[in-house]
Amino acid sequence: MKIKKQFSCTNCGSVLSKWVGQCSECGAWGTVEEEAVNASKIQISKAGTAQKLEQLDAQVSEKSRTPTSIEELNRVLGGGLVAASAILIGGDPGIGKSTLLLQLAASLTSEGVNCLYITGEESTEQIKLRAQRLEIKENNAQILASTNVEDILATIDANKKDIRLVVIDSIQTVYTGELSSSPGTVSQIRASAHELINYAKQNNIIMLIACHVTKEGQLAGPKVLEHMVDTVLYFEGDRNNHFRILRSIKNRFGGVNEIGVFEMTSTGLAEVSNPSELFLMERENNVSGTAVFAGIEGTRPLLIEVQALIAPSNMPTPRRSVVGWDLNRLSMIIAVLGVRFGLNLSSHEVYLSVAGGLKIFEPAADLAVAAALISAASNKPLPENSVFFGEIGLSGEVRKVSHSDTRMKEATKLGFHRVICSKLEKSAKNTNITTIAHLSQLKGLI
């Protein structure tokens, strides 16, 4: 059998005839790698068999869900695990992927759902030691240390009547004997995931797959891997911080951008039922440069503290540093404040941080960021027990955002009775609403 070489892009999975620095399909740099493949004869396709057609309006039953004992995971998944679904979980090393999957398998087994935990990174003894550290006792979850896809599928097939959920930890360590390339390459990940997912869907088994990430934070492997699965979850957070955010990036059976909040403890991941109190736990009142933002993550309202610090600088280009927000959006807010508000920060360094390790993506945080910057520049605290939300345009106008009632109800529940935002159609009870149409109106509030 002849062995030939080909070049594949680790980002999009496209196959190239020679090595290039930039992939011609996705435009990524430094992602083209060499692979060895078997050169086989060209196969002539045989005539296929006509398939049965179905009507779009035909009656169909809803997919059955298996709720877990981890409520934060249920929220992210949209209510529980769907039968015959494939779920991909990614995150940085040490963030808690394996811990969450082991806790999930153990809890479901104790509830009568038979689970199989397959590891390609650890031995079975290491898994048992980790279960003891997590205080998982008297559990009948099955574990297997294997990396060959054919062996894994044969083992599952021999026990498929008793297995409803399978965990693969991780997809980068498994390989199929049909390809000669090493585990972790684009072709191996694509082929192995295809076989595992197809088997799970044909036999009504839930498949959870752990996935490594690259140094840029993207899921390692071909982009087609995310298209093959039904749900993509991603762990956010710093390993030096004990808070973990589980976010849904893709979900065919629920909403996207839903988050679940966990706390890493000595006995594993613990759920945080009220993350707003968590993110505001160490907040001090009457401190300049801090503003409370009433945000929405998926369908969950969150109160998040935004901190700003402004320091004089003699550098020609003062530094702008952001943690948990978009640097380009901060530059836009600074420019709008300079032109529309009269706050010139061209000779000052600007530092912005979102407390608690959370990342904010929605533009509704513009008003809270602007208020924190103005407070830091004037060294005056913002009004006590007040929250901010609203999008700022380039002309300085404050625009309406969605889910205003939900944001205000969460603020009122936690004792924030003053809301500063754009014009609203209706407001929550027992809440002092201060509406502003332009950024310049913040001068009278600080």
Image (cartoon, rainbow, N blue to C red):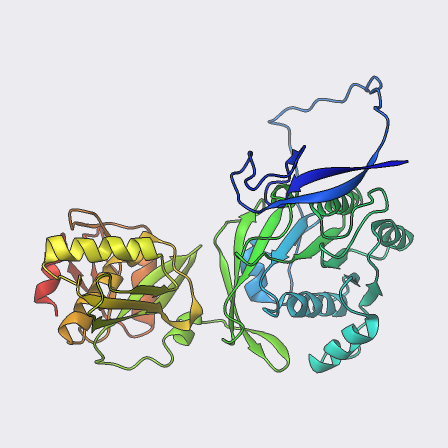
Residue 97 falls in which quadrant of the image? bottom right
Q: Residue 146 appears in which quarter of the rendering? A: bottom right
**Quadrant of the rendering where the C terminus is positioned:** bottom left
- Name the residue nearer the viewer: 419 or 335: 335
Q: Is residue 12 above or below residue 415?
A: above
x 88%, y 53%: residue? 151
Q: Which quadrant would the N terminus be assigned to in this image? A: top right
Q: Residue at x 58, y 56 (%)?
A: 214
x and y, in percent, of residue 118 in the image: 79, 61
Q: Who is closer to the viewer here, 257 or 333?
A: 333
Expressed as whole percent of the image width and height from the top left, the position of residue 216 reads: 52, 56
Q: Is residue 425 left or right of residue 127?
A: left
Residue 270 in view here? yes
Q: Nearer the viewer, residue 379 or 56?
A: 379
Horizontal arrangement in the rendering, residue 443 relative to residue 42 (left or right)? left
x, y percentage for residue 283? 32, 79
- In the figure, 356 relative to 86: above or below? below
